Amino acid sequence: MQKRYWLSQDCFVCVAGDSLVCLNISRNSWHVLQGALANAVQGHITGWPRVEVEEEGSYSPEDVLADLLRRRIIVANPSRGKSAAPIEVAPPERELIAEYEKVPATIERRDLANFVRAALLVSLPGLSRRIARRVSGAFPARRSICPLDHLAMLSVYGAFERLRPFLWRRRNQIQCEQFVLLRMLEYRGFDPQWIWAVSTYPYRKNSWIQCGGVVIDAVPSAISRYVPILAV
């Protein structure tokens, strides 16, 4: 009987071009598998996606599985794993940046207070661990049914842009800034997603904040070639 494997709880995968990309969120590490190599273990790992390639190749599934186990991308215990099926994210339909001229000239007190709360949170060590806890549900998002009030979102984003220079400079500055924006939107009752994505040839990473089909801090045309791998 063929042994089954599962994707590690801390890992996520997506198909980008002719490659399969793996992200380990707890280690903040990335691993790219050439398509034929990834396809060699399809059927061995629950939910493992197939990569469209011109030639399949003749790779040993045992060798590929051993390497993925060593990297802790997959596990043999189903209670410590999950399906490897890629995530689904609403396609970007609208960009908030295009409406930036509507941002109020003043910063609301609640947005200032929310910025301070989020900035203090992100100033603590271990942001990667905090993100991993959020993904696992131990540090949950503030889910709500707040309607997509674009003027309110603009107010939050405008306050964030004006206050962003006061954030402490960090090695992972972009992650810190986006985490602050994410929390500010949640404090105001929105249900944002922090999208992490990749592209290949050349290999690049990107991330942005999105509420439904509304992109908050990016332009849809600039992120259209990226494939989402994680939605926090």
Image (cartoon, grey):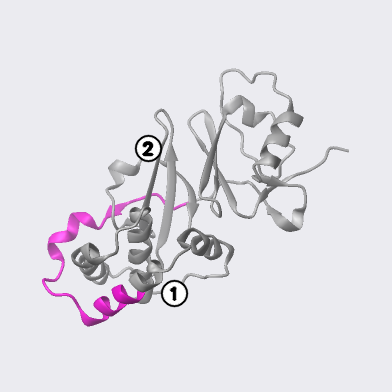
Give the left or right position of residue 67, taking residue 169 as reference.
right
Name the residue: 49% across, 58% down: 128
Q: Is residue 105 visible?
A: yes
Residue extending furthest bottom?
A: 109
Give the left or right position of residue 45, taking residue 196 as reference.
right
Q: Amino acid at mark 2?
A: Arg
Image position, residue 97 (x, y; %): 22, 56
Asked if the magenta segment contains residue 101, the reply would be yes
Q: Is residue 189 visible?
A: no
- Report the front residue among 182 and 83: 182
Give the left or right position of residue 152, taking residue 143 as reference.
left
Task: Report the span colored magenta.
Answer: 89-117
Image position, residue 29 (x, y; %): 52, 45
| Alpha carbon distance from label 2 to label 1 | 30 Å
Q: Give the residue number, with chain letter if any, for mark 2.
A: 225
Q: Specify which label sits upstream in the sequence, 2 or 1.
A: 1
From this view, report whether residue 162 is shown above or below residue 36.
Answer: below
Name the residue: 29% across, 63% down: 168
Image position, residue 173 (x, y; %): 33, 55
Q: Give the residue number, with chain letter if any, for mark 1.
A: 144
Image position, residue 224 (x, y; %): 35, 41
Asked if the magenta segment contains residue 201, the reply would be no
Q: Amino acid at mark 1?
A: Ser
Name the residue: 32% across, 60% down: 177
**Number of other residues with Cα within 10 Å of mark 1, as a class: few under 14, some 14 to 19, many 20 or more:** few
Name the residue: 65% across, 18% down: 57
Determine the image quadrant of residue 188: bottom left
Look at the numbered disc 1 and give the secondary structure of its residue: loop
Q: Are marks 2 and 1 in contact (CB under 8 Å)?
A: no
Q: Which mark is residue 18?
A: none
